[in-house]
Amino acid sequence: MKNAVYFSILLAALAAAMAGCAHRAQTTSAPGALSLGMVTDVGGLGDRSFNDSAHAGLLQAQSQLGARIQVLQSKSAADYQPNLQAPTNQHFDEIYAIGFLMNKDLDQMAKANPKQNYAIIDAVVDDPNVASITFKEEDGSFLAGALAAMVSKTHTIAFLGGQDIPLLRKFEAGFTAGAHEIDPKTNVQVKYAGSFEDAGAGKELANLLFDSGADIIFAAAGKAGLGAIESVKSRPGKFIIGVDSNQDGLAPGKILTSMVKRVDVGVFRTAQAAKNKTPLHGHLILGLKDNGISLTDFQYTKNDVTPAMMKKLDAIKAAIIAGKIAPPATREDLATFKPVAI
């Protein structure tokens, strides 16, 4: 849980690289250098979350591997195909589709271009030239839920998701189970914004959850989650748990921690393989033991997270890595989850 400083440096580099345009390319590398293309989902760069985390991995490849990188931002689903086609036409060494919403478009592209290497985040595309990178979000969400249950004064916490889909239910189920690992009587409320882009809806729902008694909200909702962060700024004694990237600095002291999904690790790992002329294909799953999931280091909330809580979190993390705790990834598995004595 000590990656916050390094990741913040990468995000600082990201902020400097972005100018808000729809199509961003960096071409400073020498001719013949590793070439990497990335297509964002509709959240785009600047979400301080999923897309920015992926871009951080791309920037790391540019810095450490000398890669030439190109980023194309999708404003709608209609942009996926043309955005994937552009770097395909240029025969990039690796092309990344950032987000499960591109799975069908990437499948079509991969079948039409069998010699091109692709990678997709958060989906499995079963083509021989595709690396499918997914994460055990339930692992980190379990830790986040355990922490929330320990810190909560009202014994009511909440999960705020973007869309009610199987991917987000992994966050929901893990978070709820983690809270019940600490206290089975903890009340976990659940709301979905219906969108990853509607910051206003995220803020409105967060206010509703706070008003109904929750004092900690785990917001896994993209830009809708940024709206939830806005809501907590004027709420004494309330916290948000951030997601995907290190969001702790967006509201210092009000973000209890962030459940970091190291999309940058997946992106950089496939870039290294492409650099070595051994491109990754198949399904790569990253969890706690792979450094693909973590909590941040409580830079702004050390007074709220006691040494006893930290010791408990470390024990739970070790139990997950050892297989003694299996965080549920579905609502069905959550229904049968039993706390484990550790």
Image (cartoon, helix red, strand yellow):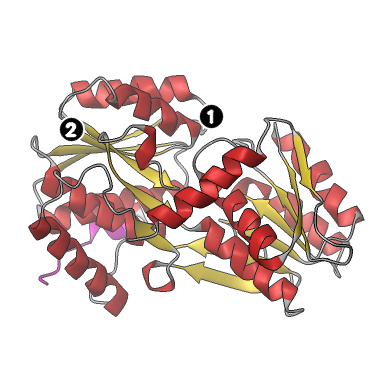
- Disc 1 is placed on an element classified as loop
Picture coordinates of residue 243 (x, y %)?
Answer: 40, 45
Is 300 placed left or right of 131 in the picture?
left
What amino acid does circle 2 point to?
A: Asp
Residue 266: tell me if it is visible: yes
What amino acid does circle 1 point to?
A: Glu
Residue underneath mark 1: 197
Identity of the residue drawn at 60% across and 69% down: 269
- Disc 2 is placed on an element classified as loop
Identity of the residue drawn at 28% across and 26% down: 232
Residue underneath mark 2: 215
- Location of the C terminus (image quadrant): bottom left
- Magenta stretch encompasses residue 340: yes
Picture coordinates of residue 63 (x, y %)?
Answer: 66, 60
In the rendered structure, are the residues bearing label 2 and label 1 in contact, judged by CB atoms less than 8 Å apart?
A: no
Closer-to-camera residue (224/274): 274
- Magenta stretch encompasses residue 208: no
Q: Is residue 236 above or below residue 48?
A: above
- Disc 2 to disc 1, C-alpha distance: 24 Å
User: Where does the magenta region start and end?
Assistant: 332-342
Q: Is residue 67 above or below residue 218?
A: below
